[in-house]
Amino acid sequence: MIKMKAIHKIKGEVTVPGDKSISHRGVMLSSLAEGITKIDGFLPGADCLSTISCFRKMGIQIEQEGDRVTVHGKGWFGLEEPSDILDVGNSGTTIRLMMGILSTQPFHSILIGDSSIGRRPMRRVANPLRKMEAKIDGRLNGEYTPIAIRGGNIKGMEYHSPVSSAQVKSSILLAGLQAEGETTVYEPEKSRDHTERMLTSFGVEVDSFPEGVRIQGGQRLISPGEIHVPGDISSAAFLMVAAAIVPGSHLIIKNVGVNPTRTGIIDVMKAMGASLELLNEREVNGEPVADIEVKYSSLHGTEIGGELIPRLIDEVPIIAVLASQAEGKTVIRDAAELKVKETNRIDTVVGELGKMNVHVTPTEDGMIIMGKSSLRGAICNSHGDHRIGMSIAIAGLIGEGETGIENAESINVSFPGFFSILQDISESTSF
Ligand code: S3P
């Protein structure tokens, strides 16, 4: 258990670890491309290390030291049939994207993960892949791990996804890349588009339009040689909120990915009256990047729903902390996807942040937070969910008394070094 106390303010300039979504895709596409790819800024968190381990088990040579990775790609059909089960750990992105890739491979493979992965729905990916004629099985007719796949000879299709999920979209697109004919995925609202952007940098033709994405089968991936991964806005979000709610704070987070499909948190913070600016905006590897400056300011409640939701889905737990410090009511709707994340995040936000006097009420598809409340320290539990663990920690920065975080090690899934960075930018912290 990690223990912490309230602090006086957040000050300084920091960087955060690499983007999780881009790091996964970097290793996957580099393994499937011809040629060597050097990745820097890679996120050495548990989730992305699971992706590396899966590709090593299929014969891909990958060297990794901290945030530097070298992948010796062997081309799309250079993967070998794995002699062992592929273990994705806690990583939903790894298993769902791998299901698409493995559906194209002329061999048998089995995917498992931890107990959280064992409760997360996989039919949302298995069913469309089956429509493409992939052979997939798993517990409850392919809903849960272990998932077994015998791939090869799949057909392109047109798919209208019922959910706005980049994992579903990416899995189908990756399968579509080696399917017969063309594959089109439509989604209700646009989800993050890192797969499309990275495929383009690997020389693939991708046709993106407002309602969806189309890809032609039979395309090769050519390594761009280098991939520079920007900082993860979903990790930066915890520090952005810390600076916005601890009086007197002033923080600059350098080199953060600000892809518009991920910047819902910026829109929401601005709508709530936060003092937030993007500095030094630029583009790296086809991804927008900027430095983010946040100062403490007074906040007011807002309404969050519709197209904003996929653009901030991972930030809802920390938005609940932010909203607890805003005057009035914040309503989050259209976010039923929260129930199938690493934990049911409606339940874990309500249960854990509730212990710290965040006034949050669950709804069918989101939650309502009433501000502004005085938070108090409490013994809370991450339930093995990294983003719940970090949300508790940020609430603890303004909680009266001591806050304890049980199962805090789960934070390493996406933000190794979280507590030391927090300590570096905090005045009068004691953890
Ligand atoms: C991710 C997509 C999102 C997100 C997850 C990472 C990705 O999941 O919550 O943390 O890298 O594609 P869904 O696609 O299930 O919404």
Image (tube, rainbow, N blue to C red):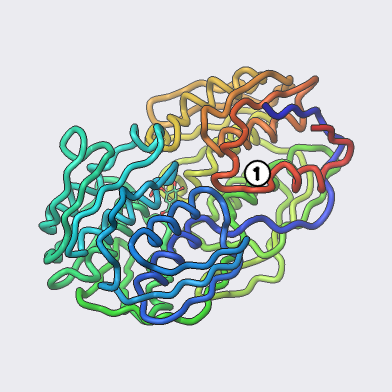
Image-based side of 110 in relation to 68, left or right: left
Q: Position of residue 168 (x, y in %)?
A: 30, 52
Image-based side of 226 in relation to 74, left or right: right
| The C terminus sits in image quarter | top right
Q: Is residue 431 visible?
A: yes
Q: Nearer the viewer, residue 241 or 273?
A: 241
Question: Residue flagged by tag 1: what amino acid is it?
Answer: Phe
Image-based side of 364 in relation to 37, left or right: left
At horizontal 59% and vertical 69% (from top left) the residue drawn is 40
Q: Nearer the viewer, residue 50 or 253?
A: 50
Q: Position of residue 268 (x, y in %)?
A: 58, 46
| The N terminus sits in image quarter | top right
Vertically, is 208 above or below 111? below
Vertically, is 280 above or below 185? below
At horizontal 57% and vertical 63% (from top left) the residue drawn is 42
Q: Which residue is mark 1?
A: 238
Q: Nearer the viewer, residue 102 or 183?
A: 102
Q: Nearer the viewer, residue 171 or 349?
A: 171
Disc 1 residue crowd, few under 14, some 14–19, many 20+, Cα 10 Å? many
At horizontal 29% and vertical 64% (from top left) the residue drawn is 174
Q: Position of residue 87 (x, y in %)?
A: 37, 46
Q: Is residue 334 visible?
A: no
Location of residue 202 by image quarter? bottom left
